[in-house]
Image (cartoon, grey):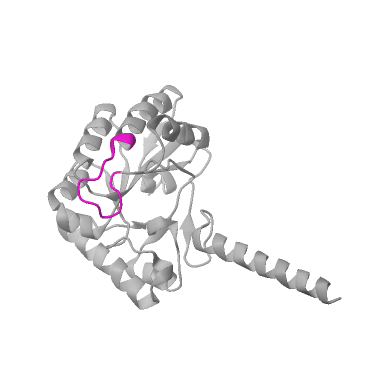
Amino acid sequence: MEAGVAGSVAAGSASAVAWMAWAVRGRSSSVFAPSVWRGPRGRKSVALTFDDGPSEGTPRLLEILARHGVRATFFQCGANVDRLASVARAVAEAGHEIGNHSYAHPLYCLHSPRALRDDLDRAQRTIQGATGARPEWFRAPFGVRWFGLREAQRRLGLRGVTWTAIGYDWSLQAERVAQRLTRGASNGAILCLHDGRELRVRPEIGVTLEAVRRIIPEFLEQGYQFETVSRLLCPTS
């Protein structure tokens, strides 16, 4: 009997841990704040998104996107915007959408709701001050949502977004990154890459650039359109 009870308790604990892990980081989780992870399936469109910028490599990425006439969404870190305000502005001036990716790229589950709110608010003010664009979308650093985020998003008018497919471009080679995105793509997919590496100065993003060079022609050949997150999720707005 005791062994059976212990087993039930252990199983219950494991289930609780698994649920919490999904609640915090599951791409479709809205436990801690409203969030979306894909767009409607009715149109052959995808959204290409980039996190952690701006960086010194972002202008090269803008050149690739411009060459193909592609509009993307850049989730920028406020600290990087402070460091490279002119690059952040160049993103907006090129017609791309800018989202909020926090100020200091913290792991929110290690911070209080007040600290989370202050970080998000600082990023919002920094991005708007440098680019003139007030972000409407937010992507959490590391994809981690936490207590206090729902209220912080509500106060700032931010809508949460995760991803349908992520490239792991900080750890894989370009071919593998491209494969992950093409295999994970479908109508309404939100694709996640990075034009920075958290808050690093002069990060190496060659893998990201090469992956983008590969996937854009392939997606276009398959008949996909590239749209910003706003256009993908709110096509009539």
Name which residue lies at 38% across and 47% down. Answer: 229
Vertical position of residue 148 compared to residue 77: above or below:
below
Q: Is residue 202 magenta?
A: yes
Q: Which residues are magenta?
A: 195-207
Q: Nearer the viewer, residue 204 or 46?
A: 204
Viewer-proximal residue, 43 or 210? 210
Q: Is residue 15 left or right of residue 75?
A: right
Q: How many marks?
A: 0
The spot of residue 138 in percent (x, y) is 36, 58
Among the 4 quarters of the image, the one containing residue 21: bottom right
Predominant secondary structure in magenta? loop
Closer to the camera in the image, 14 or 146? 14
Spot the residue most to the front: 3
> Does residue 209 appear in the picture of this structure?
yes
Residue depicted at x 61% and y 62%: 18
Q: In terms of depth relative to the viewer, which is nearer, 66 or 179?
A: 179
Residue 224 is situated, as x and y percent measured from the top left of the image, at 43, 30
For the N terminus, the quadrant is bottom right
Q: Give left or right: position of 123 versus 23.
A: left
- The x, y position of residue 27, in whole percent, is 51, 53
Seen as rendered, the residue at the extreme left is 86
Q: Please tell me which residue is depicted at 48% across the width and 54% down the height of the picture.
A: 36
Report the residue that reaches farthest toward the right: 1
Q: Is residue 50 above or below residue 24?
A: above
Q: Is residue 216 magenta?
A: no
Horizontally, residue 53 falls left or right of residue 158, namely left
